[in-house]
Amino acid sequence: MLDVDTLALKYGQSQILHGISLTAKRGEVTAIMGTNGVGKTSLLKALAGRHPMSGGRITLDGVVLDRPNAVQAARAGIAYVPQGREVFPMLTVAENLQTGFACLEGRGHTVPDHVYDLFPVLHEMSARRGGDLSGGQQQQLAIARALITEPSVLLLDEPTEGIQPNIITHIGEVIAKLRDQGEIAIILVEQYFDFAFRLGDRFVTMNRGEVTLNKPARDVPRGELLSLVSV
């Protein structure tokens, strides 16, 4: 599992995260919720090594990750699906997927069947350029590319943003399937309340860079959670 202990982060002189602590377990979805600007994306960037921590500790399966950069975090088993997807527009779908092999040193570079099983449209469009896909197809590609890295932890930042309803449903089904396989800890940052509420096994709410609630789903009434994320 992933254990985050008093993580702090600054942008210049501005303190963005104030001692964030949470645990994400394999076989569970930890849903991080809150209004815009409370630090949710900054937290995922810190976990993924996209922005250096200014304090705290990240431990993955008992191994302390010493303020990892993006490459070190990915090789340790943390996969990041960023807000905005960040697919390579001029590369084909197949080539976008193959970029995920960069963290798998010395292992085969064949896209596994189970990735295409989760997202059949990517197999059908493997020769199409990433920039020619719809927003929903690009989101599926971004998640699939993350899964290529064989992660222990999957970070998802707003996977439903700008996506048509039928693909939102499919992405939800994929997240539930990955959770139920019990091999990956999933951290989901999501503004779509009903989507997160259906999938979450644990809810963490944030406000002004601090955790305001951290409880298992069974202990969080819908109304209480809704009031916290609407502040």
Image: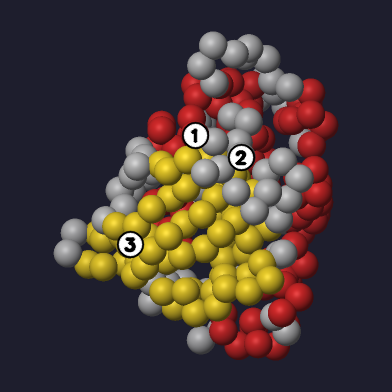
Classify 61 as above or below 205.
Answer: above
C-alpha span from label 1 to label 2: 8 Å
Residue visible at 71% across and 65% down? 200
Tell me which corner region of the image, top left, top right, bottom left or bottom right, holds residue 140.
top right
Label 2 close to label 3 by CB (< 8 Å): no
Tell me which corner region of the image, top left, top right, bottom left or bottom right, holds residue 125.
top right
- Label 1: few (<14), some or many (≥20) within 10 Å? some
Label 1 close to label 2 by CB (< 8 Å): yes
Q: Residue 152 at what x, y percent from top left? A: 61, 39
Q: Earlier in the sequence, mark 2 or mark 3?
A: 3
Residue to which mark 3 is pinned? 8
Q: Residue 170 at what x, y percent from top left? A: 80, 50
Q: Is residue 168 visible?
A: yes
- Label 2: few (<14), some or many (≥20) within 10 Å? many
Residue to which mark 2 is pinned? 152
Residue to which mark 1 is pinned? 76
C-alpha span from label 3 to label 1: 20 Å
Residue visible at 62% across and 64% down? 31
Residue visible at 47% across and 40% down? 63
Q: Residue 48 at what x, y percent from top left? A: 45, 45
Q: Residue 176 at what x, y percent from top left? A: 78, 52
